Every structure is written in C-alpha cells, then in structure tokens.
Image (cartoon, grey):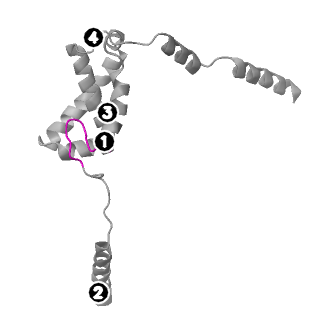
Amino acid sequence: MLHTFLPTLLLLSFSLIHPTTADILLRQNTQNPTIPTNPNSPSCLLYAHIANLSTIASNSTYRSAYLQLSPSGSIAVARVLNSAALALPPMMRNASLNLECGNWSEIAVVEAERNFTRGIVGEFGGLVGNPQEIKAGVELIGIMIAILGMFGGVWCFMP
C-alpha cells in the first residue's frame, strides 16, 4: 500500500506546485499583448466579416434568427454561412493575419451575444423575442380539448 501511495503523493505535490500551461499562456498574453497593426486593411475586414458569419453559423439560435430575418432566402444564406464556417479555421491559424488584425473570432463571439440581446443578428435588426420560443397560452387548452374530443370520438364510435 505504501509503495503505491508514496509515488502518487509525490506526483500530486509536484503537480500542485508546478505552473500549469494555462498560467504560462496567461502570463505570456498579458506580457505581450497583440495590438492590431492595421485593423482597416482589406484582409482584416474580411477576417472580421468571416468571423461574424462563422459565429452566426455555429450557433443554432443565431443561425435560425439570421435565416428568418434575411430577405435573400434561406438556401442562399445558408450556403454563405456554411462557407464562412469553413473559411474561418485557416484564418485563425494564420499567425501573420492574427498579428496584423488581432483575434476577431473571440471578438465576434462576445459581440454576437451582446447584439442578440438587443435584437440584432448580423446586419439585420428588428428581432423581437426568441424566434424559437414555444408560445403556450390559454389557446392551448382549447386545442387540447379539440384533439382529445377528436381522438376520443373516433375511439368511442369504432365498430
């Protein structure tokens, strides 16, 4: 029992005092912040646009609201969202683009949430409430009585 407990205890004590990878990365990011050198360049504007569309494409609530508000039709807009979701990972891995523009993917996630609470999805505004909300009011009682009456009537009058 002691021969397995001692190495475990040593490993645990070493892991508690050893700095984790997240701590090291946090220290590196706070010491060397990446300041965008040219945020208005065409490549940075494209990166920001792709990051916004990819954020909308990856969240089902944002996506459905965007498709409902878009006047272009859902099939064409869905293709644009899907292509943006495919175009973002290479841009995120491009170190020179991230150095020039900053990390637009993280900014897009935060801003999409903030805009959605204000009724804005992408470039479309006027969203009132949650489009996926189930409306269950007093009219549901009448609908349920009608359904039960229909099925009950069929069952009662079966030969």
Q: Residue at x 71, y 22 (%)?
A: 16
Nearer the N terminus, badge 1 or badge 3?
A: 3
In the rendered image, which quarter contains the N terminus?
top right
Outermost residue, right side: 2
**Disc number at residue 55?**
3
Determine the main secondary structure of the stretch shown in magenta.
loop
Task: Pick whichever, 120 or 70, lies toward us.
Answer: 120
Distance between the Cα atoms at labels 2 and 4? 72 Å
In the rendered image, which quarter contains the C terminus?
bottom left
Cβ–Cβ under 8 Å for marks 4 and 1: no
Image coordinates of residue 41 in percent, x first then y, are: 22, 13
Nearer the N terminus, badge 3 or badge 4?
A: 4
The residue range painted magenta reads: 117-127
Q: What element carries label 3?
A: helix
Q: Which residue is drawn at 58% across and 19% down?
A: 23
**Disc number at residue 38?**
4
Nearer the N terminus, badge 2 or badge 4?
A: 4
Q: What element carries label 4?
A: loop
For the residue carrying disc 1, how many other residues have a C-alpha within 10 Å: few (<14), some (14-19), or many (20+)?
some
Circle 2 sits on which residue? 153
Relative to 42, 36 lies left or right: right
Relative to 19, 44 lies left or right: left
Asked if one can make out residue 85 in the rendered structure from this viewpoint, the answer is no
Q: Does the magenta stretch include residue 146?
A: no
Relative to 148, 124 lies left or right: left
**Disc number at residue 116?**
1
